[in-house]
Image (cartoon, rainbow, N blue to C red):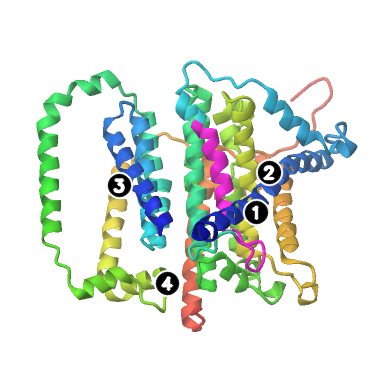
Amino acid sequence: MVVQALAFYLFAIIAVISAAMVVTVRNPVHSVLFLILTFFNAAGLFVLLGAEFLAMLLVVVYVGAIAVLFMFVVMMLDINFVEMREGFLSYLPIGVLVAAVLFVELAFVGGGWVMTDAKMAAIAQPVPADMNNINALGMLLYTDYAYIFQAAGLVLLTAMIGAIVLTLRHRKGVRRQNISQQVQRQRAETLEIKKVPVGRGI
Amino acid sequence: MELLWDGYIQPGIWIVAKILAIVLPLLIAVAYLTYAERKVIGAMQMRKGPNVVGPFGLLQPLADGLKLFLKETVIPTSANKVVFLIAPMLTFILALVAWAVIPFGEGLVISNLNVGILYLFAISSLGVYGIVMAGWSSNSKYAFLGALRSAAQMVSYEISIGLIIISVLLTTGSLNLSDIVLAQSGGIWNWNFIYHLPMFVIFIVSILAETNRAPFDLPEAEAELVSGYNVDYSAMTFALFFLGEYANMILMSGLCATLFLGGWQAPLPFLDFIPGPLWFIFKICMVLFIFLWVRATFPRYRYDQLMRLGWKVFLPLSFAWVMLVATFLVVFDKVPA
């Protein structure tokens, strides 16, 4: 258990420090890198909890896909670091307000938490003994919460279609490549062999 | 004291020994993969390849390694130094840690994770960071363009690889790599590449793109980008990228062998007397040969065609295959327990 405790403190401390670094470092690319480190340590905490499926999902989805897009955008932007700092004081009250609201909400959630025996048992053994946690998650998602799961998928689909509709535009006069047309092209349509008389040309 | 020795020190030593037993042969394999690459491509182009250093040029990789080791590490003045140095280390480390879950034989695996395949997928999806960080921190146009290209490329092909893995998982019913291999036991006709033949082909092409190998080596297209994301790297920092890239090739071949070619199992039952790890290594070498063969054979793809292939051809095909496999399993009541 000593190793687990040490690992927990390691992951937890790095996660908290790097989360703080995300908002305090000057360079936005560094802050994305710290965000990735935070995700990674959160995944480590999941592994310690015995939720290795969630941990891997966190790494695949957030670190492997979403953070890459973040990084892409941040790297491409031409950001003036000095200008960015200027508005700091004027936005400070709003930031403090948002933080305060979030903190109060968290406090309410934590304060309203009642420990019953059933919950204690669930914490001690979150997954039924006869299946691993992937099976357990699958059973929950696809049987008990199937409709909600489908609804979540629909929301994502709508978002995806929305993004496509917003960015799709047909410009006139752009030559496009038609692969099937190119593949179907016959030699007879494109090539013509002529006998050229010597010294006269065509 | 007894508890400390039995509970921590002894297992610790044992784990380190197991890790070394994989990492050292892997590094030697990487060195000789570069040699094999030069020899194979040389043979295909009717040249001799390296043949001066040592018998048949066998010491060439060591000479190359020594050269890279002794050279000066140059860090560009306008580079972001910390990120610049972390990037090659990250590439190299990620290429090594993924080996923890690859089973070399029955029970011959460092960590028998029950989400092994997801772990591999997660680690390989992180590989893009090494390249992006290198490209950005070098503060050079060529490096940055190479990094952007490769990031887009790797993210795109990961999706089709993920879907292919899903269709294999549907038929084996487990995310554990050892279980996936055991589900293919009983000879070559039980291996996944027969049932998933179209996906096997797409998988091979996708891992070529995922490891940035020819004909999809646009990130380091030497004709346009000099050498892409690693143009500003020298000596050991460059060597780490190189090692990471080749270790990734071997890893992806190992993944291919595990998923489709029956892992450590013999193709015919009477060949069982040859030990499993040898079969596994043999299969990895076969897939690696495809890597080299393709490099010597095909010209480089154009970038828009590469993206088209990933998103408009492989993605719908692999999606359709997942649907097909799932439907088949349900209709014929063959869903693995």
Q: Are marks 1 and 4 in contact (CB under 8 Å)?
A: no
* Residue at image coords 47%, 75%: B327
Mark 2–mark 1 Cα distance, whole angstroms, equals 15 Å
Q: Read off the chain for label 4.
A: A
Dot 3 lies on which element?
helix
Give whichever of B182, B306 is nearer the camera: B182
Q: Which circle marks residue A132 in the picture?
A: 4
Q: Which circle marks residue B27 in the picture?
A: 2
Mark 2–mark 3 Cα distance, whole angstroms, equals 45 Å
Residue at the bottom extreme, as displayed: B333
Q: Position of residue A96 (x, y in %)?
A: 12, 36
Residue kind at label 2, given as amino acid type: Leu
* Residue at image coords 68%, 28%: B69
* Residue at image coords 35%, 69%: A137
Dot in front, 4 or 3: 4
Marks 3 & 1 on one chain: no
- In terms of sequence position, does the residue under pointer 4 or pointer 3 come before the other? 4
What residue is disc 1 on? Answer: B253
What residue is disc 3 on? Answer: A163
Q: Are marks 3 and 1 in contact (CB under 8 Å)?
A: no
Q: Is residue B87 magenta?
A: yes
